[in-house]
Amino acid sequence: MIVPMKKAYIVVQAHNGRTMLRDLRKAGLLHINSEQVQNQQIEQLQKRHDQMYALRNVILDLQDKKHMPSQTEVSDEVFYELLERYQGLLETKVKLEEEIKADSARIEELKEWGDFNPEEVKQLSLEGIKLHFYTISKKDLKKLDSSIQYIELSPVAGQMAIATVASELDPSIPAKPFSLGEHGLGFLQKRKASDESQLQDVVKSLREAGTYLDAYSFQLQKLEMAIHFEEVGEQLEGGDDLVWLSGYLPETKVDDFAVLAKQKGWAYRLDDVAEDDYPPTLIKYPKGVGVIKPVFDILGTVPGYRENDVSTWFLLFFTLFFAMIIGDAGYGIIFLVTAILLHIKAKKANTMVMLIYVLSIATVVWGSLTGTWFGSKEILVAVPFLQTLVIPSISNYPELFGLTANTAQNTVMKFCFIIGTVQLSLACILNVIHKIPKKDLSFVADIGWLMDILALYFVVLQLVIGEPANLMYVAAVVGLGFLLVVVFGSQGPGIKFGKGLVSGLGGFFTTFLNTISEFSNIMSYIRLFAVGMASVAIAQSFNSMAGGMLSGFAMVGGILVLVIGHSLNIVMGLLSVVVHGVRLNLLEFSGQLGMEWTGIAYEPFTQTVEEN
């Protein structure tokens, strides 16, 4: 369920404003919708954070990930002394790397010209002998005017190298000028070698800073907390005498907040959330349903405060979709073993491990019912017990049970359409339950949508599977449902019936298009069948490729084909779950519910680390 919120206001004397914020942060109760603000203090803190974050990443990248150094705790004073030192080393590292890169490029240019001292050329220039260097082809060199004085040098990169005396070549002549630069080849090579040696020392010192990585993480968290504190501080309103702050509080925390306010001597007020407020969403998951939280966290989806909490239904349908898309009991066992290993390693089952347990068991069950074990018919034939677990009408190997492939496929497709119809119908029912207590007449429109969905299901069966349907009855039900949506779709609390009716008639064509889309929504659930069949076909193909290699010297190759092939199939299946399994919940189901997933998670203003 979505936990109801209260809007809280706190008023204190202006000089106690920041003290109130520190006490409020320590309590960790109030969610404050802080906006992105900038002031000099925040900019300085953000700059320090960015520099520290960049330095920490450099130090981390230099570590041997298999043998991380033991960590040393240091005081804030010592840490910032170390920070200044390592920041200087990082700047030196960047400077050396840039100089080495520039010198390397220049050395490559000078290699063909050989070693020389640019100062000697400059001295000749002071004495009146100005030299200009070029590379030019033999053909173009012969075409030079005889009045041009030049000295022929050793060839450079397949071209003739010359030094003209006194005058430069005309730009129209196809010759490439060469700049001597400030330093010669020998000097640059020595400087590069010196820089590389110095860089090694700097990198070694930065690598040794790995013993303070935990200290860097701690200080970064402190800076993030300080930045948030300043951002919240900008939300204080008032004048020289009084300041106040507002935020949102779960109703379950009201008593704790009241006790805190009385202890600290704050003036406060608690109001119900108004229609124009935008409170955060706090979901209290029913027992056993919290395992779906990692999926929401990965997707970054949060229902709006006034929307339905669909976590229970999301878990049920997502589990079914996962099982049908992966579709193989053998793969399910692999997931189950993975969950067990993660459980043993962590010594406890967190929500992610529990989710893998649920999904793997569901996959094993579905794979057993369809007789799919690593896409191999031979395994099913060799183990009679596995055949007893199969429901023949949905089996991927129906010929073993005296059925045709067409019969089994039609049954699975029908099952997919039933799932779609049930899920979309459930959305309509949830909307009705949600709206009736609010005296929202638009619930009648949801009944109309429910009628349309149930009727269109039979149209889908006739068009895809060929099951006959009484189209006159279907058309009558769809028409009645359409009429209910037009009349009641724009009704709502505080809206006069006539005004809602006019609005509904104005959206007549849009409602017509949405009714047609209900047909395509049911049809879209066929993707469960299609992706599941594709997974089986891919597994069978790799089994076939490896089949002739599982003996003699080729056995290693055959095993390799099986491992790589099935691994690839598992990865593709997981991607399909994201693309298709999640889509059916977030688009078709949520769209029917009218959910936009535009909520913001309840994140109270809190102290994340202990300050010294």
Image (tube, rainbow, N blue to C red):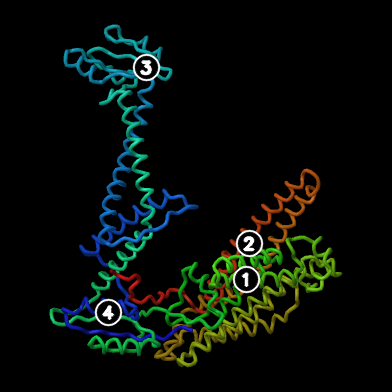
Q: Is residue 463 visible?
A: no
Q: Return the mark for residue 23.
A: 4
Local crowd size for mark 3, using a 10 Å CA cut-off: few (<14), some (14–19), many (≥20): many
Pick whichever of labels 2 and 4 is earlier in the sequence: 4
Give the distance between the C-alpha atoms of the residues marked 4 and 1, in whole angstroms.
Answer: 43 Å
- Kind of element beneath mark 3: strand
Pick whichever of labels 1 and 2 is earlier in the sequence: 1
Pick whichever of labels 4 and 3 is earlier in the sequence: 4
Q: Is residue 448 toward the left or the right of residue 103 in the image? A: right
Pick whichever of labels 2 and 3 is earlier in the sequence: 3
Mark toward the viewer: 4 or 3: 4
Give the distance between the C-alpha atoms of the residues marked 3 and 1, in whole angstroms.
Answer: 72 Å
Query: In percent of the image, x 36 and y 56: which residue is there?
Result: 212
Identify the residue under disc 3. Answer: 136
Amino acid carrying label 2: it is Gly
Q: Is residue 417 toward the left or the right of residue 191 in the image? A: right
User: Residues at badges 1 and 2 in contact (C-beta under 8 Å)?
Assistant: no
Q: Return the mark for residue 359.
A: 1
Residue furthest right as drawn:
402
- Kind of element beneath mark 2: helix
x then y, percent, for residue 453:
61, 80
Identify the residue under disc 2. Answer: 573
The answer to whether residue 120 is above or below residue 34 is: above
The answer to whether residue 392 is above or below residue 154 is: below
Give the distance between the C-alpha atoms of the residues marked 4 and 3, in whole angstroms.
Answer: 78 Å
- Picture quarter containing residue 362? bottom right
Between 329 and 594, the one nearer to me in the picture: 329
Amino acid carrying label 3: it is Ile
Q: Quadrant of the C terminus?
A: bottom left
x then y, percent, for residue 50:
31, 57
x then y, percent, for residue 378:
81, 60
